[in-house]
């Protein structure tokens, strides 16, 4: 029976027949680069390697108009090839702590904040808006959502990127995000299969392991991915993690395991979309394999697209190694053809196969990206995600009309403004995956919308003894001290600072600007708020809660270690 999808599949098959080996391999490679426009060097690099997919980072983005021009030029280049097939133009726009597009667009609070709202409608709306804005910039694949179930508070790389510790919550919300994104026209990518929420090593640095039994994997890690497949997700990204219950070979990551990719994902779970690897430059892979060898092993195992985010020289060597492995038979011809066909088929399904030419109405570039309506939605979600874990001292809401009174010479009774101090960590990229954006404290910026004269102090991510002493000194005698923590549960010096500041005697509110687990390290502090991200919308929502213009309704989607906190989960 004829249908647009069948017609697209037929077109993909015809295009495949016209392709050389190099063309087919090019459809199986996604590369990153440093450029912010289609330079002649970049064009030569992409064409010489027949590359079919690209990934963008913050380094490639200057603003909506620039990105729209860049992606438009890439697709025009693709249209001029002997075997023309549009690019997958991919990006990690998860929201929250991982967002490559920051200026001029709408940035949502992220998965754990959405989990804290408990509202699947917000997930749908956030994913739909993100996809719509991406399309206006010429971006057609989102390497999101994260479907890892964050069951280990010590996980250094996932944390708030997860919806929470409940597999069913992650499954429900992940499926909503996938459906909304793909209905809007952007390919969604569920990651990181089979799930790396329960690890304590960051794959960017070294190779973690999930040593659980198959029963445990079936009841926790795999639950969200089964829901993603049922929702028709276009792509699934592999994890650079070992899973001994599925792959018995020691130190063989899922990315290179035929048992995981073909046996578990294809045969058992029935996934028919694109399997894409996580970046092969990550330490979990690069410490053990060269880029070309890693790519070859991943393709042999069943990967359809291998991701190479850096170093064009290494990319060229790796792609040529794949060509040679295909010519020699190390990579079977059927393996190349099936993956290239699958990639082209998904491109056809999403209208990407024929390189899109901008409509006349779109020649002015993106128009509604970062609209006030979209930003208002992000703030609304952030407001309903903020979670007050404790307020023993009744500080929240804090009254700004309670300052000291002074009678002037004119006999007028004046209220002296409350002296507010904000202490924030110098937010750095903790896991080599997130982009922090402009310098300066987003928490202090938000507080100043209520207290324009609020002062602020920035300390190191792991503050020194001198910084801690200075913070305690400057906090003494203040009307209110607001202290931000940022993954403080992984940086004990942050907890030491919070305790010293609290001992200075001023009223203290602690704001968890990332993972909510920090509070377990300073239970004696009376007031703690979890925001799940440091983005402007989340910081504004936190300030609104502190000063009483928003009533907090968020609930923890994870368990804080220790029996005291279990009732909040």
Image: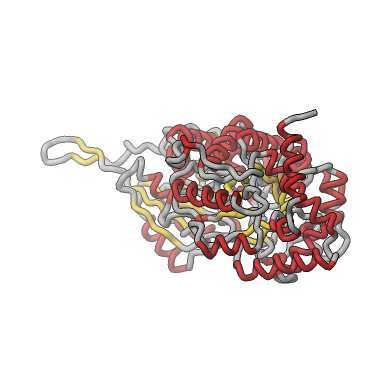
- Where residue 380 appears, as percent x and y from the top left, is 50, 33
Q: Which residue occupies 50% across, 52% down?
A: 70
- Residue reaching furthest to the left: 410
Q: Is residue 34 left or right of residue 473?
A: right
Q: Which residue occupies 77% across, 29% down?
A: 2
Q: Which residue occupies 76% across, 68% down?
A: 293
Q: Is residue 221 left or right of residue 125?
A: right
Q: Nearer the viewer, residue 550 or 130?
A: 130
- Where residue 194 appears, as percent x and y from the top left, is 77, 50
Placement of 293 over or under 145, stated as above or below: below
Number of numbered discs on residues:
0
Q: Quadrant of residue 115?
A: top right
Q: Is residue 72 visible?
A: yes
Placement of 267 over or under 316, stated as above or below: above
- Where residue 363 appears, as percent x and y from the top left, is 45, 40
Q: Is residue 466 left or right of residue 168?
A: left
Placement of 44 over or under 162, stated as above or below: below
Quarter containing the C terminus: top right
Q: Is residue 94 left or right of residue 167?
A: left
Q: Which residue occupies 62% across, 54% down?
A: 81
Quarter containing the N terminus: top right
- Where residue 177 appears, as percent x and y from the top left, is 64, 37
Q: Is residue 558 visible?
A: no
Q: Nearer the viewer, residue 199 or 8?
A: 8
């Amino acid at each position: 029976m004829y249908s647009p999808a069948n017609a697209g599949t037929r077109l993909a098959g015809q295009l495949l027949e016209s392709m050389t080996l190099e063309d087919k391999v090019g459809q199986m490679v996604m590369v990153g680069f440093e450029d912010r426009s289609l330079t002649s060097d970049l064009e030569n690099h992409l064409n010489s390697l027949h590359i079919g997919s690209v990934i963008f980072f913050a380094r490639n983005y200057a603003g909506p108009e620039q990105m729209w021009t860049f992606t438009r030029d890439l697709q025009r280049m693709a249209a001029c090839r002997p075997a023309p097939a549009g690019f997958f133009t991919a990006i990690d726009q998860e929201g929250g702590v991982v967002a490559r597009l920051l200026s001029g667009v709408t940035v949502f609070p992220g998965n754990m904040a959405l989990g804290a709202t408990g509202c699947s409608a917000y997930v749908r709306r956030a994913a739909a808006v993100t996809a719509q804005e991406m399309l206006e910039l010429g971006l057609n694949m989102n390497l999101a959502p994260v479907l890892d179930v964050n069951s280990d508070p010590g996980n250094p790389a996932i944390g708030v990127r997860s919806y929470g510790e409940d597999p069913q919550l992650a499954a429900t919300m992940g499926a909503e995000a996938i459906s909304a994104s793909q209905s809007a026209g952007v390919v969604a990518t569920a990651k990181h299969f089979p799930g790396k929420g329960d690890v304590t090593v960051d794959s960017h640095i070294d190779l973690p392991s999930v040593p659980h039994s198959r029963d445990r994997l079936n009841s926790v890690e795999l639950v969200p991915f089964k829901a993603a497949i049922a929702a028709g997700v276009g792509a699934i990204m592999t994890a650079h993690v070992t899973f001994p219950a599925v792959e018995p070979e020691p130190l063989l990551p899922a990315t290179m395991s035929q048992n995981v990719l073909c046996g578990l994902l294809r045969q058992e779970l029935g996934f028919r979309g694109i399997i894409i690897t996580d970046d092969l430059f990550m330490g979990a892979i690069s410490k053990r394999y060269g880029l070309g060898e890693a790519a070859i092993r991943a393709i042999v195992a069943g990967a359809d697209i291998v991701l190479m985010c850096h170093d064009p020289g290494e990319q060229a060597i790796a792609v040529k190694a794949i060509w040679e492995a295909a010519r020699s038979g190390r990579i079977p011809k059927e393996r190349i053809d099936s993956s290239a066909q699958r990639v082209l088929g998904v491109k056809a399904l999403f209208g990407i196969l024929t390189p899109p030419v901008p409509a006349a109405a779109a020649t002015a570039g993106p128009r509604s990206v970062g609209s006030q309506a979209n930003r208002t939605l992000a703030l609304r979600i952030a407001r309903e995600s903020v979670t007050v874990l404790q307020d023993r001292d009744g500080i929240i809401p804090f009254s700004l009309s309670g300052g000291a009174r002074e009678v002037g010479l004119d006999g007028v009774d004046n209220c002296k403004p409350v002296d507010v101090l904000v202490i924030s960590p110098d937010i750095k990229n903790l896991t080599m995956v997130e982009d922090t954006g402009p310098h300066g404290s987003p928490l202090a910026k938000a507080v100043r919308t209520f207290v324009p004269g609020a002062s602020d102090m920035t300390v190191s991510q792991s503050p020194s003894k001198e910084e801690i002493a200075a913070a305690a000194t400057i906090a003494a005698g203040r009307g209110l001290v607001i202290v931000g923590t940022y993954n403080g549960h992984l940086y004990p010096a942050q907890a030491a600072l919070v305790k010293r500041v609290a001992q200075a005697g001023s009223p203290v509110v602690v704001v968890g600007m990332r993972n909510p687990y920090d509070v377990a390290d300073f239970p004696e502090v009376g007031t703690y708020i979890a925001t799940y991200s440091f983005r402007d919308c989340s910081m504004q929502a936190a300030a609104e809660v502190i000063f009483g213009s928003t009533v907090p309704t968020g609930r923890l989607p994870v368990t804080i270690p220790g029996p005291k906190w279990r009732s909040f989960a």
